[in-house]
Amino acid sequence: MFVDSHCHIDGQEYDADREEVIARARDAGVTTMLNVGTGDPHGGPFERAVDLAETHEGIYAAIGVHPHDAKLFDNRAEQRLLGLARRSERVVAWGEIGLDYHYDHSPRNVQREVFQRQLGLARELNLPVVIHSREADTDTISIFREALTGYRRGGVMHCFGGSLGMAEAAIELGLFISFAGNLTFKKAEDLRDVARQLPLDRLLIETDCPYLTPVPFRGKRNEPARVVETARCLAGLHGKGVEEIGRTTSENFARLFGVRLYGTEVTEP
Ligand SMILES: [Zn+2]
Ligand SMILES: [Zn+2]
């Protein structure tokens, strides 16, 4: 059993074959997925993400304005997203939010302001957060620390690419660390060194598809079924079986987001 903790299969890249992509995921044992909406908050991408979750068992939704689009965030966007999160039980996280200093598609001061603001919204709704941080880990951690130290719901640093120190600081603050297909890349020796040293009970796996297709499928469109390759890589690093990594990261996912894993029995206490 595997969970893809971060995918974007509501996007147009999958318009032609979305149901087959979902079926292939199930066949590969990827029972549960978190589909993260992104895009211009005024253009309806979050409604689309929620729609997908509401029409498919085992698919949940995260909504939040990506740092790339921080400059498009305003009161109207905020109200629209808040309404959606309150309306649908399938919205289980706020994100992806954070900072991206690699592309700088929005000015950095705006990114920081919108990140802070959305951490507050997550707290208001009592949702865990999905954090995107690229070349901005120091600011990301300090803003999170300031806004949400001790926050019971926590969150995840998705597609982690930072140092061991950053990962440990994030875990200290109650965050999980999620690894994507780039963990398998030939040149990612440093990242694998980090992953090797982190406790398995704080780790998640994801595809971030359609991006970051893992080895040996590089060059092709990515899809949730391929999260198994990241699990395999992590298994090698920790000297475990791939099944065990799948199970542990799935349980971590259920614990963090407070959701049931698709296909498992609900057991009464
Ligand atoms: Zn991201
Ligand atoms: Zn993403």
Image (cartoon, rainbow, N blue to C red):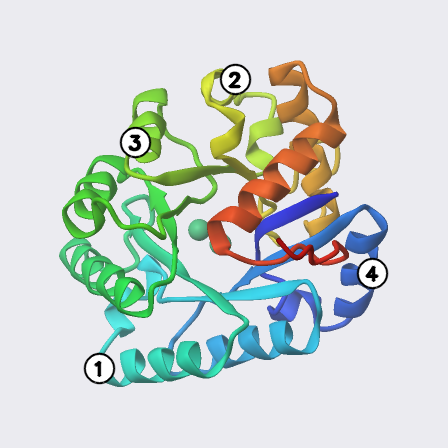
Residue 219: numbered disc: none
Q: Is residue 156 left or right of residue 248?
A: left
User: Residue most toward the front?
Assistant: 269
Mark 4 or mark 1: whose residue is earlier in sequence: 4
Q: Which residue is mark 3?
A: 172
Where disc 4 sits, the SS reads helix
Relative to 99, say whether 21 is above or below: below
Mark 4 CB lies closer than 8 A to ligand 2: no
Where disc 1 sits, the SS reads helix
Residue 55 at x, y = what percent? 68, 78
Residue 196: numbered disc: 2
Mark 2 or mark 1: whose residue is earlier in sequence: 1
User: Residue most toward the right?
Assistant: 27
Spatial CA span between label 3 and label 4: 37 Å
Spatial CA span between label 4 and label 1: 38 Å
Relative to 29, say whether 216 is above or below: above
Depth order, front residue of 65/68: 65
Spatial CA span between label 2 and label 4: 32 Å
Binning the other alpha carbons within 10 Å of mark 4 as few (below 14), some (14 to 19) or many (20 upward) gives some
**Quadrant of residue 18 within the rendered picture:** bottom right
Question: Hey, what amino acid is under mark 1?
Answer: Asn
Where disc 2 sits, the SS reads helix
Residue 187 at x, y = what percent? 54, 21
Q: Does the residue at mark 3 contact the one at mark 1 (Cβ under 8 Å)?
A: no
Question: Hey, what amino acid is under mark 3?
Answer: Glu
Q: Which residue is mark 1?
A: 75
Mark 2 or mark 4: whose residue is earlier in sequence: 4
- Quarter placement of the N terminus: top right
Residue 23: numbered disc: 4
Residue 228 at x, y = what percent? 72, 38
